Amino acid sequence: MTINWNEIETRWRGKWQENKDFETNPNDKPKKFITVAYPYPNSPQHIGHGRTYTLADVHARFYRMKGYNVLFPMGFHYTGTPVLGMARRIKAGEKEILDGLRNIYHVPEDAIKTFVEPIKIADYFHEEIKSGMIEMGYSIDWRREFTTIVPGYQKFIEWQITTLKEKGRIIQGSHPVGWCPVDQNPVSQHDTMGDVEPKIDDKNFLIKFKFGEFVFPITTLRPETIFGITNLWVNPKTVYKKVSVDGETWIVSAECVKKISFFEKKVSEIGEITGSEIIGKNATNQDGRDIPILPADFVEPSMGTGLVMSVPAHAPKDYQALVDFKKDQPQSSEYQLIKPISIISTEGYSEIPAKDIIEKMGISDQSDDKLEEATKELYLKEFTDGKLNDRCGQFDGEKVQFGRDKIRVWLQENGNLEKFPVLENAPVKCRCGAECVVKVLNNQWFLNYGDEEWKGLARNCLDEMNILPNNIETEFIEVIDWLHERACARQQGLGTKLPWDKDWIVESLSDSVIYMAYYTLSRFVNDGTVSPENLTKEFFDYVLLDKGDVGLAASTSKLSEDIINTMKKEFTYFYPVDSRHSGRDLVQNHLSFFVLNHVAIFEKKLWPQEIVVNGSVMMDGAKMSKSMGNIIPLRAAIKDHGADPIRLAIISSAELLQDADFNMESVSGIQSKLESLLEECSRLKSGEIGELQAEDRWILSKTQSKVAEITEAVEKMRLREALHDILFTFETDLSWYQKRIQAKGRDDVSGILHQINSARVAMLSPFAPHVSEEMWSNLGNSDMVSKSAWPEYSADKVDAASIQSEELLKSTIDDIANILKVTKIEPKKIVIYVNSDETKSKIYRKMLSIMVGGQNNMGVVMKELIADPDTTDAKKMPDYVQKVIKDLHSESENIKKMKLEAESFDEKEFLKSELNSIGKKEFGVDIEVYSESDDNIYDPKGKARHARPFKPAILIE
RNA sequence: GCGGGAGUCGCCCAGCCUGGUCAAAGGCGUAGGGCUUAGGACCCUAUCUCUUAGGAGUUCGUGGGUUCAAAUCCCACCUCCCGCACCA
């Protein structure tokens, strides 16, 4: 049968919509509030995006069947800058982006025309993504939908950010950003040519040297090396500028003047001085030492300040430069006396490590490319293993990695050091063509995530939260540890203005942290019950924090107390968030901020209960990316392959945290699996179930244990495993069952199969909701499977005896097959001998009880056997005991327990009635069953005495 | 560098937390058989090595260790992947 997926899906989606099945209001059932990070609509969603939403949808559908009142809402995150950049590029007619829209995203031409306006881009992809979500069958309550730039949401964000400020969580400071001097805007990855993220090196510092009335500022990554400076290098050909900087007069290159003009400084040029005028004089170190200024052509005016300090003992470049310099000087020159000053001792290196490494690498002049490598190697070595020596005064003996920071602080306190952030990956070009610079923004607003008391609350929340999978929890703990101040406002982009400083917009990762609360209120805004102006601070305080009173909320909001209380009830009913789903790339930011902001704003009982983190999706083993052209838009995939097969392929390809490898073969594999299951379902009729035979009791028991396993797996979001059990493991059991009934020639099992497959389809329905409805209806149900109850495990339906007897039957068949395989004989007669020795049975049962806890030491087992008068005979048959240990050893703890709990049963009776039919089918001959002690026994080879409980002896002729 | 994660029988991927149920699930591939006019799909069987009695041997990145027992716990090493921020 070939399924028309889209036809089935449209039909059932129509029914869900018609019945408003996923519109959730408070009622008297227990609730679950499942949320996923909402999408940013600047492109259609592809298979990768589908993963998080699909997992959450399965989760929501599962809880719905478990009897919860489940709220699963969705919004759209318009906040941010990417669509701004896109609109600019589209306006400029950039081919690259237009081609992408046309050829990869297949956006119609008249829509593209509107894309010069950022919001139109977001609106277009918003609808696109939403349609995809509907087509995927996500059980979303769309009445609550919003974007983050609608007035109601903005009211909520204003309240949120004001509350954070009032609680002292927001501080102000300065911050370096990548900046386009032409656009007068901060730049991020989307704003640069080639999409490079401007990387700012914040560990670069400027150290001040005195030069008469002037200051020589010199940049370095290694402030500790000031103790080892022998000289400065200045380019004689460069014309330096004299500039007044915050009251000091600096001498720096023209390029440097430009850079510092973007820092928070008062900068004005007052004159010029050539390099050659400076050379030969001395500058003064912070400790008063005179440092000679020497000429060097290699000094680039564009690097740092255009001045270089020389630490020849520890910087290979400086060492080589000094050697080269001395060569050109007369022997009598005083410069010949300049010697490297060693300040760091590192194991494996001499006093002058720079010299060691230069010699080791065979570097002979300063144009050698290997100098770069030498510098890196030594830098790292000294950082990790080096110790400062006695030339470093109070820092003697410090390890470099700690000493550096101490020296930096010391210099800073004495006014000899400032930060000098640089672009690590310069040059970075803005899309407008200008080269980006580092700009230090004054008065930036920060969320003070570095605050220890705040971190403490967050840890507290994490401790009590359920984090799935568990092993990602350590990552959260780490993130909370290293998190520090984070800018929460920016100067451009869509979003909500800071209420107290309208020049700033609340940054997109800060306006998406507690918005789940807004889902509980948004439907009242959407249906016009309240309007955005009604949502005052006092209203939110009362509804969300239970602060103030309803009277105050009513008077400021101009809403009736009834409405306010209805909304408050709705919030109180649904909050806290029971499960938050997101991709693992959001652990470091969104998910951690989500926790931090909740603990900052809400009281403990409203803190999130669970976070579920999933890995990303790869396409045929490669990362999905626009440039690789391997993006599969979700809607196209649904159209071609059906929503359910896509859902299952995504879920089954990897465990939760693993990156899933998506490929079309797995989709078609799943399609045919579903097709055959659907076919099966239309064949089965519910009917009378007659008297149960051994295999019936077995398959029904197995079904029970499957239900238990699958339920647990879904609860822990091990969906791959659960799905696997539903689709495949069930099949293994069913095919054994088929074998048995065929061997017996039975045709009265339709009722049993119907019952089993009903449970199976019910459990499949959260995963593949559409086709499961179809299966469910084919099974003869008139209601919806999505509204049916999740199969319940009941222990009393498990027949332990039937499981162990069926195991015996299987293992006996296996043993026979095994013997036939090894001996390659054609069987003419098969004879089975079961154990009937009372002593052996007693010993067996005693051993079961000993070994069920995991004990399997021969000595211990034997000792216990002998100690019991009932089994003391064991000492006469150590061979037997040893073999039984092996038998039991290879059995699962579960089976052992079951055997122990079940009454012992008559193996002979069971095998006699069950073995022949299946044996005849498998091997083509009749199987005779004897017990060891039978009088009329046929045992020409004396095999019978080898029989053990659950391990009959076998004779094949 | 800091932090997180991974290395399993041709490939993908479970198992590791809670040691024995592990020669190690499942899928793919491959081989043989069935079905079919043929192909596809589907079904069955096999797929580390050896083995004429249900058995044995050697395997889970490398090297050690703990234990009666290690893919699983501990230590060291090697290799690979991801994140490091104002960006959604």
Image: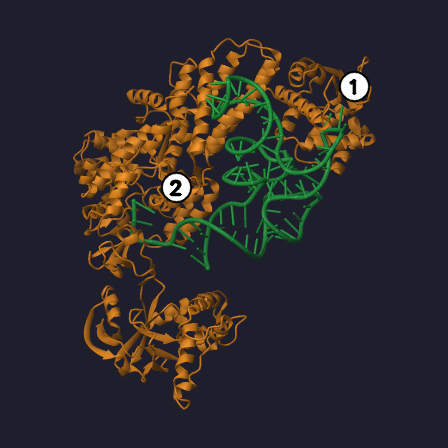
Closer-to-camera residue (A799/A625):
A625
Q: Secondary structure at mark 1?
A: loop
Q: Would residue A686 be visible to someone looking at this image?
A: yes
Q: Secondary structure at mark 2?
A: strand
Q: Residues within 10 Å of mark 1 (few under 14, many from 20)?
A: many
The image shows residue A129 at horizontal and vertical percentages of: 29, 35
Please name the residue that numbered disc 1 is placed on: A932
User: From the image, which quarter does the C terminus of chain A lie in?
Assistant: top right
A173 sits left or right of A674 in the view? left
Q: Would residue A311 be visible to someone looking at this image?
A: no
Q: What is chain B's hue in the picture?
A: green
The image shows residue A83 at horizontal and vertical percentages of: 24, 45
User: Which chain does the residue under circle 1 lie in?
Assistant: A
User: Which chain does the residue under circle 2 lie in?
Assistant: A
The chain drawn in orange is A
The image shows residue A383 at horizontal and vertical percentages of: 46, 66
Please name the residue that numbered disc 2 is placed on: A583
Residue at horizontal 38%, vertical 42%? A624
The image shows residue A776 at horizontal and vertical percentages of: 42, 18
Residue at horizontal 50%, vertical 66%? A385
Closer-to-camera residue (A68/A79):
A79
Residue A564 location, quadrant: top left
Residue at horizontal 74%, vertical 17%? A828
Residue A214 location, quadrant: bottom left
Above or below, A862 relative to A473: above
